[in-house]
């Protein structure tokens, strides 16, 4: 909970992932912290932590966040999207009402209206009704989005299944949108193959590599949130070969599902990194300590002895704090 309020992106992303695994037990603590937090960035992180939990208790704060606008409202729309098919009392209908009211409100910030509308796209009947309601909206951009809603929803589905068949789009951002829509429900084996295909595309296209690498990190984070280690080999190798900062999703995934072998990869990355890159080294050290603590690896463990022998400089900074 403290990490959600910290400026370190890796610690924040890792905390969000770990809270998602804890699930419903964490909801009261997050809600209490949210209501008393004054920092907007911390509240945004808390809202993101609530998204995968699908808990009806989040509706009041999500409604309030919708009214506040900005990134917080967009995160709230994602929280409510996860509640649309809930069977807990009136949770589903209340989430639907809140999103519909936001999508149809001309007084609401445009991007928040779009986020609310997009959250409703996977329900065919609602999608049709919303498109009809928006056909005469005074905002031309909203009218246009209403006309194209069905096509975009179908497009995400096509992009996703093409990717699973080995046909990646030219732009990694397109596949990222499809991952957001389908990743949480995809077969673990399919996600593992997707990691391999994205990695291969990275190697083929050196210039736009950062976009594909960030996407691969996002797939690793989806797998980690589901507690899966099926692609841990790729995560470990990426960390081991890193000599500069990686997208935050890689370390967040490592902190959640990394094993003892990942400690060696983290130590290798630490040793290879320029000592002046203090931020990245601090993130690697934090991930190292988290994995060691979760796996109950003490200073007497053989893995730490190997690290001390292979990467002596890293060992001085990392093992002393285990």
Image (spheres, rainbow, N blue to C red):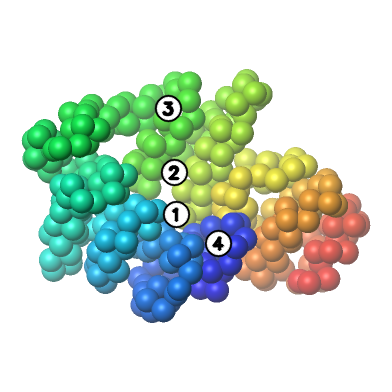
- Vertical arrangement, residue 88 with respect to residue 124, above or below: below
Distance between mark 4 and mark 2 Cα atoms? 25 Å
Within-10-Å neighbours for mark 3: few <14, some 14–19, many 20+:
many
Q: Is residue 242 visible?
A: yes
Report which residue position mark 1 lands on: 226
Earlier-in-chain disc, 4 versus 1: 4
Within-10-Å neighbours for mark 4: few <14, some 14–19, many 20+:
many
Disc 1 secondary structure class: loop
- Vertical arrangement, residue 161 with respect to residue 185, above or below: above
Q: x%, y% of residue 33? A: 43, 76
Earlier-in-chain disc, 2 versus 3: 3
Report which residue position mark 4 lands on: 12
Report which residue position mark 3 lands on: 163
Q: x%, y% of residue 159? A: 36, 27
Q: Is residue 166 visible?
A: no
Disc 3 secondary structure class: helix
Camera-nearest label, 2 or 1: 1
Task: For the residues labelled 2 and 1, say whether their Cβ atoms are less than 8 Å apart.
Answer: yes
């Amino acid at each position: 909970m403290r990490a959600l309020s910290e400026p370190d992106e890796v610690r924040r992303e890792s905390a969000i992932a770990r809270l998602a695994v804890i699930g419903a037990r964490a909801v009261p603590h997050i809600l209490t912290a949210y209501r008393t937090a004054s920092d907007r960035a911390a509240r945004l992180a808390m809202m993101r932590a609530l998204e995968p939990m699908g808990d009806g208790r989040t509706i009041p704060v999500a409604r309030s966040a919708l009214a506040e606008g900005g990134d917080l409202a967009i995160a709230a729309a994602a929280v409510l999207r996860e509640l649309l098919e809930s069977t807990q009392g009136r949770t589903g209908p209340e989430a639907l009402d809140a999103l519909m009211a936001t999508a149809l409100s001309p007084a609401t910030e445009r991007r928040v209206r779009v986020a609310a509308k997009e959250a409703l796209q996977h329900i065919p009947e609602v999608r049709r009704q919303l498109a009809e309601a928006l056909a005469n909206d005074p905002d031309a951009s909203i009218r246009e989005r209403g006309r194209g809603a069905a096509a975009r929803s179908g497009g995400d589905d096509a992009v996703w299944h093409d990717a699973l068949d080995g046909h990646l789009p030219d732009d990694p951002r397109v596949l990222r949108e499809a991952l957001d829509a389908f990743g949480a429900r995809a077969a673990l084996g399919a996600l593992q193959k997707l990691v391999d295909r994205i990695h291969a595309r990275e190697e083929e296209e050196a210039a736009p590599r950062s976009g594909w690498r960030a996407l691969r990190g996002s797939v690793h984070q989806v797998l980690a949130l589901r507690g899966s280690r099926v692609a841990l080999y790729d995560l470990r190798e990426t960390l081991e070969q890193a000599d500069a900062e990686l997208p935050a999703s890689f370390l967040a995934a490592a902190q959640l599902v990394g094993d003892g072998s990942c400690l060696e990869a983290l130590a290798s990355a630490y040793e290879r990194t320029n000592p002046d890159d203090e931020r990245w080294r601090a993130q690697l050290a934090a991930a190292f300590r988290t994995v060691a603590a979760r796996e109950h690896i003490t200073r007497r463990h053989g893995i730490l002895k190997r690290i001390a022998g292979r990467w002596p400089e890293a060992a001085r900074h990392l093992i002393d704090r285990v």
